[in-house]
Image: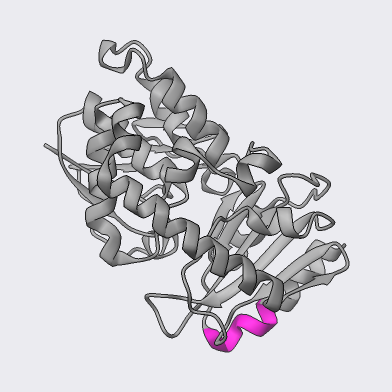
Amino acid sequence: MFRITTRADWDGLVSAALLSVVEDCDRIRFIEPGPFQDGKGEVTPDDIVANLPYRQGCALWFDHHSSNKLEAVDFRGAWWIAPSAARVIYEYYGQDEALAGWDELIEITDRIDSAALTMEEIKNPRGLILVSMTVEGKRLQDEPYWLHLIRLLIKNDTAALLADPKVQNRCEEFRYINEEFGQALNIYSDMVGNVLVTDFREVFHGEQGNRFLAFALFPNCNVWVKAFDHPNDPARVQISVGHSIFNRTCNVNVGELMARYGGGGHKGAGTCRPLKTEADRILSEILGVLKE
């Protein structure tokens, strides 16, 4: 029996659902990419790792982030630059009859994880796009909800998932969270040339809302840098960087940039987790690269 090790974002949950259908899995473990890359969390030959950096000793590995590309390492599974890790898994098991009819879910997951969304979908998210925004991935106490979503995703019945009372309650909560988040973005954000900089450190500890909302509120930016206190490690700051999904003129490979600071990601988005004592310096260096 395998254990699935993945991250708690929409792509990670769909990846876990796919693997649960095609492999004999009885456990799911959630971990953030940074700690996993740093060696936290034991990896055994019973682990299938998805949507995370590669760790030696796992049974299978699936990923799509450019910063996680391996050189001269033999592994079972698949890595290629794709819109989502779910897409990589789906193509790898493409001949498995158990995945018949999953095309629609994979296509929407591609759009969500690659940020191929419209302005209307950002301002007024609905359906699976809205549900995906309820999976923020940082609150460890949300694990029962993540597992509940995976059980629903395994059934591959979108109508039933959207009608589920727990999902509906989370969507309603998200609408309130997103309104507060939008207000905070307007208060604590500044344009520095082409870069939108949001500094939530020590001033905003509310829930993180729609990760694309800033691009609708600040359409002139082409890249967004956000810094906030890490919710699970008081010694660290989380820094996220993302290309605007509307003003697509930023040519910096964010995954490679974040990898310089122990993080990772793909070309359009990534994160790092520096110590608080190093955060100001690293933020300044990141801004210097993005403004060029």
Could you tell me which residue is drawn at 72 percent across and 54 percent down? 215
Residue 26, percent from left and from top:
13, 40
Residue 12 quadrant: top left
Q: Is residue 72 visible?
A: no
Residue 17 sits inside the magenta stretch: no
Residue at horizontal 61%, vertical 81%? 279
Q: Is residue 106 above or below residue 247?
A: above
Eyeballing the image, is 93 above or below 182?
A: above
Q: Position of residue 148 (x, y in %)?
A: 23, 45
Task: Residue 1: name its quadrant.
Answer: top left
Taking depth in this image into account, of 162 and 98 the one nearest to the observer is: 162
Q: Nearer the viewer, residue 196 or 236?
A: 196
Residue 277 on the magenta span: yes
Dominant secondary structure of the residues highlighted in magenta in the image: helix
Q: Position of residue 246 (x, y in %)?
A: 76, 44
Residue 116 falls left or right of residue 231: right
Where are the magenta residues, as a range? 276-282
